């Protein structure tokens, strides 16, 4: 098969690779998105993804071998042990034995074929394009964060003032999930002017440039970037007894106003990926059209994937997501 292989920092090669083997179903990939974690790996910043490795985990396609052959599916890339304590409690994302396709030892989906356990595949209904179904993975991160935030909020989400930091795919997904769950006031902070325009068209969101404007006194902040500056912005924007949900993995420390959190009973929590139930709920919401048209990703060929990574790194992409087609 052909694959886009990570061969070292900022190096990707489109070349022949071994077909996947084993007992799990094999999926012929139709569409696969570029995630921020793929960008971290490409830059050489993720020891869990050593070269050579096929990256890519936001995928959808058709089963070509194994149970369900011929079925179009979207892929939950988080592979877990169903017998561990976390999985039995419905917290598969926190399983100590979790693996993810595109992270060693599992090869990813920037390829014509990928092997995935049957329990990680969700059938796509007729009429739903695979490029939309492939968005289930990044949007499920926002679904999980919003589900946890609703439990922590002191008022109904429908009455909450919400702020999303970052207008990339994770932030856009979180904003769409907030709207799908009834949030009526959703602000989205995004520096890139082209991306702000895309966000504004995707839903009833108030997109703004955080270098020029600030939004304060909000009940819920979702930090989809996760760097010192966005954590500081979240600390300043949230109102007393408010909630900050931290998805982004941009940097590991800095920016939090812990003293204010203590004095004003502000809740801060981290949120990592999603549970199997979250992924399936997100997929069903996409299939039902509850998350909008999802027409904002840019589609490119897998053979041109290396250029796509370069363009994202250079800030030359307005779309919140690039999806590759093998």
Image (tube, rainbow, N blue to C red):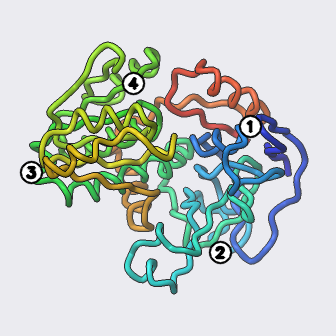
Q: Which residue occupies 39% across, 67% down?
A: 277
Structural crowding at the residue carrying mark 1, measured as other residues with C-alpha within 10 Å and reported as few (<14), some (14–19) or many (≥20): many
Q: Which residue is mark 1?
A: 302
Q: Earlier in the sequence, mark 4 or mark 3?
A: 3
Label 2 sits on a secondary structure element that is loop
Structural crowding at the residue carrying mark 2, measured as other residues with C-alpha within 10 Å and reported as few (<14), some (14–19) or many (≥20): few
Q: Earlier in the sequence, mark 4 or mark 1?
A: 4
x, y (%) of residue 263?
14, 48
Q: Residue furthest bottom?
A: 83
Q: Is residue 37 left or right of residue 199?
A: right
Q: Which residue occupies 17% across, 36% down?
A: 218
- Marks 2 and 4 in Cβ contact (< 8 Å): no
Structural crowding at the residue carrying mark 4, measured as other residues with C-alpha within 10 Å and reported as few (<14), some (14–19) or many (≥20): many
Whether residue 212 is situated above or below residue 4 in the rendered picture: above
* Residue 308, quarter of the rendered image: top right
Q: Earlier in the sequence, mark 2 or mark 1?
A: 2
Q: Which residue is mark 4?
A: 190
Q: Is residue 102 visible?
A: yes
Q: Which residue is mark 3?
A: 155
Q: Which residue occupies 66% across, 60% down?
A: 101
Q: Which residue is mark 2?
A: 67
Label 3 sits on a secondary structure element that is loop
- Marks 2 and 3 in Cβ contact (< 8 Å): no
Whether residue 79 is situated above or below residue 15 in the rendered picture: below
Q: Earlier in the sequence, mark 1 or mark 3?
A: 3
- The C terminus, quarter of image: top right
Give the Cα separation between the discs numbered 2 and 4.
43 Å
Give the Cα separation between the discs numbered 1 and 3.
45 Å
């Amino acid at each position: 098969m052909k694959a886009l292989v990570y061969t070292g920092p900022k190096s990707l090669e489109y070349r022949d690779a071994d077909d996947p083997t084993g007992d799990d179903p094999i999926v012929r990939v139709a569409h696969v998105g570029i995630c921020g974690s793929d960008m971290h790996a490409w830059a050489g910043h993720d020891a869990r993804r050593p070269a050579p490795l096929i990256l890519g985990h936001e995928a959808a396609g058709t089963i070509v071998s194994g149970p369900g052959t011929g079925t179009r599916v979207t892929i939950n890339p988080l592979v877990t042990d169903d017998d561990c304590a976390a999985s039995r409690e419905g917290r598969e994302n926190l399983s100590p034995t979790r693996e993810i396709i595109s992270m060693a030892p599992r090869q990813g989906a920037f390829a014509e074929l990928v092997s995935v356990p049957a329990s990680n595949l969700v059938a796509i209904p007729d009429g739903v394009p695979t490029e939309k179904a492939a968005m289930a993975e990044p949007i499920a991160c926002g679904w999980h964060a919003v589900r946890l935030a609703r439990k922590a909020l002191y008022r109904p989400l429908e009455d909450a003032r919400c702020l999303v930091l970052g207008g990339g795919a994770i932030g856009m997904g979180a904003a769409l999930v907030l709207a799908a769950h009834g949030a009526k006031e959703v602000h989205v902070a995004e520096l890139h002017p082209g991306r702000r325009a895309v966000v504004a068209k995707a839903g009833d969101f108030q997109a703004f440039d955080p270098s020029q404007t600030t939004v304060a006194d909000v009940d819920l902040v979702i930090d989809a970037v996760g760097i010192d500056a966005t954590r500081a912005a979240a600390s300043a924007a949230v109102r007393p007894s408010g909630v900050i949900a931290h998805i982004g993995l941009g940097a590991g420390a800095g920016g939090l106003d812990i003293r204010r959190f203590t004095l004003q009973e502000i809740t801060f929590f981290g949120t990592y990926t999603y549970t199997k139930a979250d992924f399936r709920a997100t997929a069903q919401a996409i299939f039902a059209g509850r998350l909008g048209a999802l027409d904002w990703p840019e589609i490119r060929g897998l053979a041109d994937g290396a250029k796509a990574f370069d363009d994202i790194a250079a800030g030359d992409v307005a779309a919140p997501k690039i999806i590759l087609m093998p």
